[in-house]
């Protein structure tokens, strides 16, 4: 895409040709979208989260529609890191060679599980640009609270993982206390932050009096959480110096522009991929057109340019 604005950004050591990324869990492994468009148009893709060993995830029903969004309780079902690299490794290598950065998300229920999956990823040495640590998984050893629910817990994860890899480390954060937790992660060597993860919610079928999911609660995503996410990106950007990838309800280029103005260096398209497989390249085109309309020569002139 030829533009009068330089759209290239660097997300904590990840050199992206434009700011558009995809959110983990909404874009499969990338190759599923190649039949719709050339995925290498995007700056980066984030692979669905993978653990050290296979996870079955939660039983069906796993998803339901909401007004202005959706709710899921997939449970991070995945084949485990060995099967994942065996199945997807060649595509990741190809996509990197085509100029789109590949970010692998790591999933774990404890600090030790996170260490194990990162160590195994290093042993397998897939051709990727970065790791994203999902610290929103329930920590089963601590009663099911998110793995990085507090600054201390988040720092513990980063402190254990940082020495294991020279790859850039992003952290997918829960939508809670983002400024303080972000500072703790930065202090322990995080290269960038991804926020926000889904909001916890509940949906009841009033006719059956049961949850519309197999679990009582689930994660809400889509347009309904967009303005909460923009606010949290802005709050976190005031607290840290490392770059942020904004996630939450991005359906248009203007949605992506809100994140940029709030302080995000990159923006991930999530739920929109599920109902419009062409959404990411369309949003990239719209974001580029918006940047051109602002009379700047470089997208960096717009990052954090919000004025009240």
Image (spheres, rainbow, N blue to C red):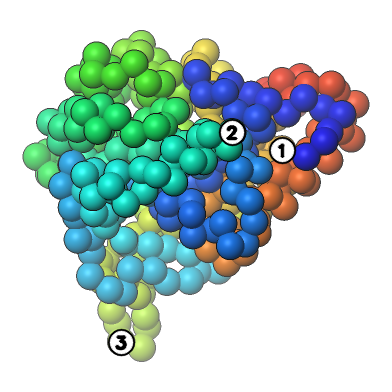
Q: Is residue 53 visible?
A: yes
Q: Is residue 154 above or below residue 175?
A: above
| Quarter where residue 204 is shown | bottom left
Q: Nearer the viewer, mark 3 or mark 2?
A: 2
Q: Could you classify mark 1 by the number of other residues whose Cα lies within 10 Å: few (under 14), some (14-19), or many (20 or more)?
A: many
- Residue drawn at x 57%, y 23% as measured from the top left: 15
Q: Are marks 3 and 2 in contact (CB under 8 Å)?
A: no
Residue 99 — which label?
Answer: 2
Q: Is residue 305 left or right of residue 149?
A: right
* Earlier residue among tags 3 and 1: 3
Quarter placement of the C terminus: top right
Q: Nearer the viewer, residue 20 or 81?
A: 81
Residue that carries the numbered disc 3 in the rendered image = 208
- Residue drawn at x 50%, y 18% as measured from the top left: 13
Q: Position of residue 209 (x, y in %)?
A: 29, 82
- Residue drawn at x 15%, y 32% as measured from the top left: 116
Q: Is residue 255 left or right of residue 144?
A: right
Q: Is residue 136 visible?
A: no
Q: Nearer the viewer, residue 241 or 119?
A: 119
| Quarter where residue 47 is shown | top left
Residue that carries the numbered disc 1 in the rendered image = 257
- Residue drawn at x 31%, y 61% as measured from the top left: 74
Q: Position of residue 161 (x, y in %)?
A: 24, 22
Q: Is residue 52 left or right of residue 219?
A: left
Question: Furthest-left residue in view?
Answer: 141
Q: Is residue 245 above or below residue 282?
A: above
Spatial CA span between label 3 and label 1: 42 Å
């Amino acid at each position: 895409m030829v533009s009068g604005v330089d759209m290239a950004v660097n997300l904590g050591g990840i050199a992206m040709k434009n700011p558009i990324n995809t959110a983990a869990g909404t874009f499969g492994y990338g190759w599923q979208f190649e039949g719709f468009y050339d995925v290498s148009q995007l700056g980066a893709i984030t692979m669905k989260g993978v653990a050290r060993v296979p996870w079955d995830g939660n039983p069906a029903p796993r998803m339901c529609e909401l007004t202005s969004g959706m709710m899921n309780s997939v449970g991070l079902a995945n084949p485990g890191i060995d099967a994942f690299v065996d199945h997807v490794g060649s595509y990741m290598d190809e996509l990197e060679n085509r100029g789109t950065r590949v970010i692998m998300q790591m999933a774990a229920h404890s600090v030790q599980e996170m260490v194990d999956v990162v160590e195994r990823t290093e042993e397998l040495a897939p051709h990727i640009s970065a790791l994203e640590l999902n610290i929103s998984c329930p920590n089963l050893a601590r009663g099911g609270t998110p793995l990085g629910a507090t600054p201390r817990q988040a720092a513990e994860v980063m402190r254990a993982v940082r020495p294991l890899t020279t790859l850039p480390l992003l952290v997918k954060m829960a939508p809670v206390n983002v400024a303080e937790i972000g500072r703790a992660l930065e202090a322990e060597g995080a290269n960038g932050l991804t926020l926000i993860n889904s909001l916890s919610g509940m949906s009841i079928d009033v006719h059956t009096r049961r949850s519309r999911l197999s679990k009582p609660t689930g994660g809400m995503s889509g347009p309904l959480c967009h303005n909460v996410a923009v606010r949290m990106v802005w709050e976190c950007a005031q607290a840290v110096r490392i770059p942020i990838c904004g996630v939450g309800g991005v359906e248009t280029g203007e949605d992506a522009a809100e994140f940029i103005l709030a302080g995000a260096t990159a923006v991930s398209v999530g739920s929109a991929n599920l109902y419009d497989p062409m959404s990411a390249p369309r949003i990239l085109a719209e974001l580029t057109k918006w940047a051109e309309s602002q009379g700047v020569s470089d997208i960096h002139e717009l990052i954090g340019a919000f004025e009240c």
